[in-house]
Image (cartoon, helix red, strand yellow):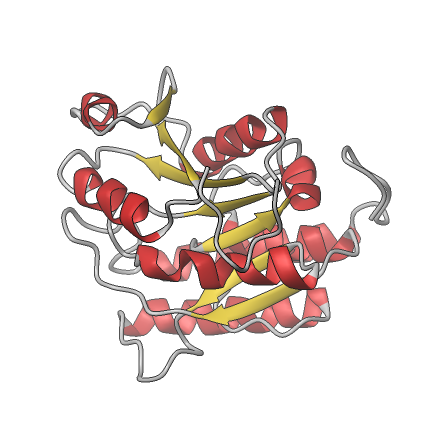
Amino acid sequence: MAKDRHTPAGLRRLVIIPAYNEARSLPDVVREVKAAAPGFDLLVVNDGSTDETSEVARSEGCVILDLCFNLGIGGAVQAGFKYAVERGYDVAVQVDGDGQHPADQIEALSRPILEEGCDLAVGSRYLAPGRYEGGRLRRLGNAVLSRMCSLLSGQRVTDSTSGFRAYSARALAYLAHRYPADYPEPESIVLLARQGMRIREVPVRMRERRYGRSSITGVRPLYYMTKVGVALVLDTVKEAPRGHEGGKA
C-alpha cells in the first residue's frame, strides 16, 4: 500500500463509503478516492440498495459489504467500523457515496488522527473559506445541534451533522459496538467525548450531491433537530463514562 510523507510506516488506512441506491454517483466517487488517496484501502457498504449499487462497486474493483436489507446510515457505517476493527486498521475515513465529499481532502482530514493523536476529526463546511449555503432550516438545525454538542462535549463543534469524518483505532473499537442507528453524527460526538476521546474539526469544502435528493428536506430538519436533541440530552444522564472495548478512555 502506498505511503505519503505524512504517514508513519506500517499504519493501515481505510475509506468507508456507505451507499444506498448510489449507482449513478458511485463510479465517480470511487475513482476520485483512488486517485486522490492511493494510500487508503477502500470499502463500499451497500445498504440494501434496490438499484445496481453492488454491481457498480464490484465493477470498480471495490471490496464490498452487501447488507441483506436497508439498515440506514447508522447500521451501514457501523458495519464498516466492524470491518475496520476486525482487520486492524489504524484510521478510517467516512466518505458519502453521493459525491458531496471531495476526495482530495481525505489526507488533510486524517492528519489529526495520524499526527496529533486525535480520535475523531470532523470535516466542517462552516470553517472553510466562503459561505456554505444549504437550506435555511437545515442550517438552523445544524447550528442548534452543534451548540448542544459543544456544551455537552466540552469541545468546540461547528458542524455536528457532517458525515465527512476520520476515526482513530480507539474510536473505531468503541463505535463498532456503540453507534446510534438513526442520524448518528451529532450523538457520536458526545458519546466519544464522554469516553475522554479527543475531537477536532478540520475545514473542508463540500459539494451539492450529484444525483438524487437528500432525505432531510422540507420540515424534516425540525424533526431531526428535535429527535437528535433529545438523544443528546439522554446521553448525558446515562451511566458515567467507563472503559470500553479497545482500551480505557
- In this view, the residue farthest toward the bottom is 130
Q: Is residue 234 visible?
A: no
- Quarter of the rendering containing residue 161: bottom left
- Quarter of the rendering containing residue 16: top left
Which percent across, then down, holds residue 53?
Answer: 22, 28
Q: Is residue 95 visible?
A: yes
Which percent across, then down, holds residue 8?
Answer: 62, 51
- Quarter of the rendering containing residue 127: bottom left
Which percent across, then down, holds residue 141?
Answer: 43, 68
Placement of 113 over or under 84, stated as above or below: below
Residue at 37% from the left image edge and 15% from the top image edge: 68
Placement of 41 over or under 213, stated as above or below: above
Which percent across, then down, holds residue 121?
Answer: 56, 60
Of residues 29 and 48, the one drawn nearer to the viewer in this rendering: 29
Residue at 53% from the left image edge and 26% from the top image edge: 83
Placement of 79 over or under 93, stated as above or below: above
